[in-house]
Image (cartoon, helix red, strand yellow):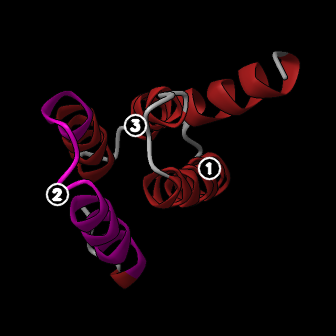
Amino acid sequence: PCTTTAARTTVQAIRTAFAEAPEATKGMAEKAVSLFEEEKYPESMGQFRQICDLVELTDERRQVASRCLITITAKIQEAAESENDKSAEKYIKYNQVNK
């Protein structure tokens, strides 16, 4: 997991941005990163969406979390296309229907 430079950069950016965050927010970010590292992209995306919805989130942290959502979306799309990952395909279809 997290073998690409982009993946390692994403993980480092989140950990750096949330290092001084309130404990609850920091815990949510760490959970999102753990899910990302485990390649559980749909679950990680859900966690990052919850983080982005936090009213008290700073602009910097919101931007970093939003960039992670973009990265995760690409990972899900990649999994659906290249690995014939049925769960990724289902997740993409679900999001298309529920936008």
Q: Earlier in the sequence, mark 3 or mark 2?
A: 2
Q: Which residue is mark 3?
A: 44
- The span picked out in magenta is 6-26
Mark 1 in CB contact with mark 3 (< 8 angstroms): no
Dot 2, crowdedness within 10 Å: few (<14), some or many (≥20)? some
Q: CA distance from mark 3 to mark 2?
A: 18 Å
- In the displayed structure, would residue 20 be above or below residue 94? below
Q: Dividing the image into 4 quarters, which one contains the C terminus?
A: top right
Q: Is residue 92 magenta?
A: no
As drawn, is 36 to the left or to the right of 22?
right
- Nearer to me, 23 or 38: 23
Quadrant for residue 51, please give it: top left
Q: Which residue is mark 1?
A: 73
Q: CA distance from mark 1 to mark 2?
A: 24 Å
Mark 3: secondary structure:
helix
Q: Position of residue 46 (x, y in %)?
A: 48, 27
Q: What residue lies at 55% left-to-right and 28% top-to-bottom?
A: 53
Q: Earlier in the sequence, mark 1 or mark 2?
A: 2
Dot 1, crowdedness within 10 Å: few (<14), some or many (≥20)? some
Q: Which mark is residue 7?
A: none
Q: CA distance from mark 1 to mark 3?
A: 10 Å
Q: What residue lies at 25% left-to-right and 52% top-to-bottom?
A: 37
Q: Is residue 7 magenta?
A: yes
- In the displayed structure, would residue 5 be above or below residue 41? below
Q: What residue lies at 75% left-to-right and 25% top-to-bottom?
A: 95
Q: Which mark is residue 19?
A: 2
Dot 3, crowdedness within 10 Å: few (<14), some or many (≥20)? many
Q: Dividing the image into 4 quarters, which one contains the N terminus?
A: bottom left
